[in-house]
Image (cartoon, helix red, strand yellow):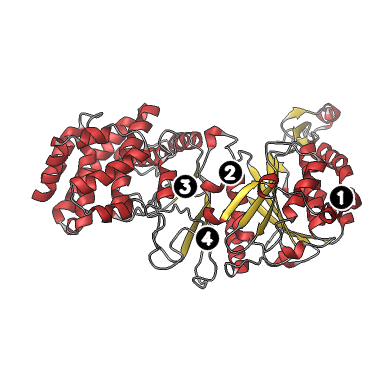
Amino acid sequence: MIDLVAVQRACNMLAKRAGLRVEYVTEQMFCTEPGGRLIVQRPSVSWNESQLRIWRNAVCHEIGHWLPEVRDIFPLLVKKKINTSDVFGACLNVVDDIRNDRNRCNVYPGTRQDKVFTTEYLMSANWIPMIVKGDGNREFPNRIINTMVCASVGVLAYDDAPLHKTFSSVRTVLDDEQKAWIDTMLKAGWFDRWYALDTAEKEWQFCKDILKEVFKMPDSEVDQMADQKGQPDDGGGDESDGGGEAEADDDDTGDSDGDGEKESKSKKKVINKNIVTVKYEEMLGQKSHDKKRKVIAGIHIDYNGYAEGRYDPHTPDSTKIGMAEELSPHPGQDYQVRWIENSIEQSNVDTIANKARRFLQTETRKHYNCNQREGKLDTRKLTRIVTHDKNSSLAPAIFKQTAQKAALDTCVSVLVDCSGSMEHEQKYPLAVAAAWGMVEICETLRIPIEVAAFSEYGPSNNYHIILKEFARKVTKETMIDRGGRAANLMHSNADADNILIAYNRILQRREPKKLIMVMSDGSPASRRGDCMTFTKQVVKNIEKDHYVDIMGVGILDSNVRLIYSNNRVIDTAEQIPESLIEILKANVMVKK
């Protein structure tokens, strides 16, 4: 019988090393999702050894794509806007799978035998019958992809001699034109060149060259598929990446190991007008704090029932992320700085650290549950040994157990609405004062925190203004200065776009509990369309995914209740300390 506990433990361990979290499902599925989630079919005790080996190889193949040595394929797909559903993208997938398999077998040598077995099995059981039947080998693009799959087995045989026989078997079922392509590749050294590829950029160039020189595709057609940056989107709309950077999933048509059972890959893109995948890896603007767990993160926004074309999300080209001094070189207006200073003074947030410290001492103090029948001996209850009913089958309750305690393994991201409607003596300054209060709390409790203001200065300029970075401390004077500088850029507010940026930035953190706080005085307002509905969609998906907690803090306004399930309204500066402590109690503590 299969030891499912050991199998899943090994899977979880390998995934964790690659920065992935495993989620088991009943469906036949192997894919990676935004946020570093690896979705795999749950193994069954009824499986035989062959089924288990195929499953293990599929899992290790997916994990392999996220190892640092081969992860450069993701930025290239984003940079070139490559569509992996066309012939170029599919060929690039097949070519990259060879490098992935070679690398992960070097990193984890124990996976090599499963790779060889799976390739032999799936080629003979799935791929060869499909070619013989002929239905999947008629269209020109499919014929090219099938030839590349056949060739990939030959390249794999460079490291694994048993696959030479598999390559010969696969080659015999190809038609004359496909065999001629294979012969050309062998004689002209294409296999050797393929085997030597060690970067995504070289793979990209290899695919361009082989499609032009071996398969004789028109140069202009290949060049267009190879670099679609600046090309008009097909279908007019939401199938493109809403943030200019899309990575979604597609059928694994050209997997080098014949892994036809996989339905999708993280580096693939679904052409579906009802789904937009917003990816901001080029916009993150910070180094990973945990090199072992560096992930390319994002979030799927479901547009079912949402009017197409109502909102055009910002892209990296229209978004600027940076420190306040970089994005707003001139100091803030005197009145803005004075308002912020007054709000901080009126709110008395400087004393909030002591309240937070007392709260921490109370929450983390060791407590015991007494009157237990096992655990640590409670000397105060020893008299029960004498008074205990000897005829009772129960042991005397003379033990105590440590109660579950709380810890602060948390990080926080605060977003401050910097729109024109916030330009009021009791609004924007109140939000900055509240943000400074959170900084005081978090630094006292050693909780990493980032604070950013956001403003849309015209339809083509979305500013994400960093007031405090995760890794650096900030003084009150610096916070006031940066808040004043950010106020120079006040205009509209594209809440959803900046929430997505904060979401991607905080996902890089290794703390298990993550919280985004959005401080705003009203509804989202963007010149790019219906930002209110788009913001609701983004927040709904974040709340549903449960990777990051999100809450809205209304500044003299209760509109946050229409967007965020978790919300709180602050009406005066004097309410800030008490409100922040309540937020701390409800959202920051992690039960161990």
* Circle nearer the viewer, 4 or 2: 2
Task: Farthest residue to the front: give it.
Answer: 330
Q: Which residue is mark 4?
A: 301
Closer to the camera, 505 or 221? 221
SS assignment at label 4 = strand
Does label 1 or label 2 sit earlier along the sequence? 2
Using the numbered discs, state the Cα–Cα distance from disc 3 to disc 1 in whole angstroms: 52 Å
Residue 145 at x, y percent in the picture: 23, 50
Name the mark on residue 504.
Answer: none
At 43% across and 46% down in the image, what residue appears? 42
Using the numbered discs, state the Cα–Cα distance from disc 4 to disc 3 in whole angstroms: 22 Å
Does label 4 or label 1 sit earlier along the sequence? 4
At 32% across and 31% down in the image, what residue appears? 112
Using the numbered discs, state the Cα–Cα distance from disc 3 to disc 2 in whole angstroms: 33 Å
Q: Which residue is mark 3?
A: 24
- The amino acid type found where label 4 is placed reads Ile
- Tag 4–tag 1 contact (CB < 8 Å): no
Callout 2 crowding tier (Cα within 10 Å): few <14, some 14–19, many ≥20: few
Q: Toward which corner of the image does residue 543 lie, by quadrant?
A: bottom right
Does label 4 or label 3 sit earlier along the sequence? 3
Closer to the camera, 534 or 286? 286
Does label 3 or label 1 sit earlier along the sequence? 3
Callout 3 crowding tier (Cα within 10 Å): few <14, some 14–19, many ≥20: some
Left or right of 80 on screen, residue 562: right
Callout 1 crowding tier (Cα within 10 Å): few <14, some 14–19, many ≥20: some
Q: Which residue is mark 2?
A: 285
Callout 4 crowding tier (Cα within 10 Å): few <14, some 14–19, many ≥20: some
Residue 382 at x, y percent in the picture: 83, 27
* Circle nearer the viewer, 3 or 1: 1
Name the mark on residue 341.
Answer: 1
